[in-house]
Image: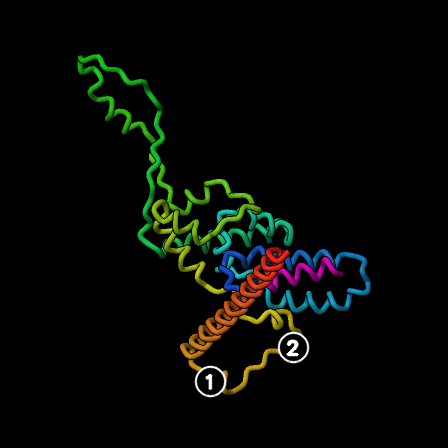
Amino acid sequence: MYQFLKGFFEVTTTFSGTKYPTANLYFMNVYLVHSAIIEASAGVNSYMAPMLAVMREKFMKYWSDYSIFLSCAAVLDPCIKFKFLGYAYSKLYDGDDALQRINLVKTTMTSLFNEYGSGVHVNENIATSASSSTCGLGAFSDYDQYVESTSSHEERSELELYLAEPAKRLNENVNILDFWSKSAARYPQLARMARDILAVPVSSVASESAFSLSKKVITPNRNSLKPKTVEALMCLQDWYRCKLQKKEDNKRKAEVVAVDNDEDSSSDEE
């Protein structure tokens, strides 16, 4: 029971509105919850059966169809890409269903990428190497033209080049925003796409409400608010929470400094 609920606590904390999680964290954390529910449901813990039935029903209602857009955000994580998506879908679904889901993400990813420009391509010239020779007689004056005509030109987009690179290990501590900031010169079109996708907030829900079994309460007043007003209120709420968090952090630091000073004073007196 402890290990099962511990996973939910960690995911809930990650998705808490006060943590400002980036969109790439969505897929892996939802997968952890999904796989935990499936594994626990297949177990023999009969005393957990009623709770698991309710949890699975609610999860399948809201989360079983993984957000395609946020799955694209996971692909932009150099530690995940399509490798982890393929692994996760193969664990959760049958072969054909898993393949269909991964292909849908690939199609959406390509479509989104194409909307960010005219498709700047990088030419990769694949030609047979030849040793240079200078004879001074002009016998090889047409050599460059021959190489050009026999070379195969493969145009690959920034997205294809990025996906062709090996994925980093999952346990690597990669700052994804810093990664794309540094990769902007190499993948300018893809970096613009990453900037917009990763800016989408994963959650603005308070952690205590994330797995609540109660129904959503939308009052007439809240339902009549215009979208810009709702957005402004959410931003104000996030700023207020962040300000309170900073005050608490500063208070803790001050307490630690005070304790250290008291210990130093005691040492001097001795």
Of residue 132 and residue 98, the one placed in the foreground of this image is 132
SS for callout 1: loop
The residue at the point 49 percent across, 40 percent down is 166
The residue at the point 37 percent across, 47 percent down is 187
Q: Residues within 10 Å of mark 2 (few under 14, many from 20)?
A: few
Judge whether residue 3 is colored magenta: yes
Is residue 65 in view from this perspective? no
Position in image of residue 168 (x %, y %) = 52, 43
Res 214 label? 2
Bounds of the magenta segment? 1-13
Residue for badge 1: 224
Q: CA distance from mark 2 to mark 1?
A: 22 Å
Judge whether residue 258 is colored magenta: no
Say which amino acid is labelled 2: Ser
Q: Quadrant of residue 13?
A: bottom right
Is residue 211 in view from this perspective? yes
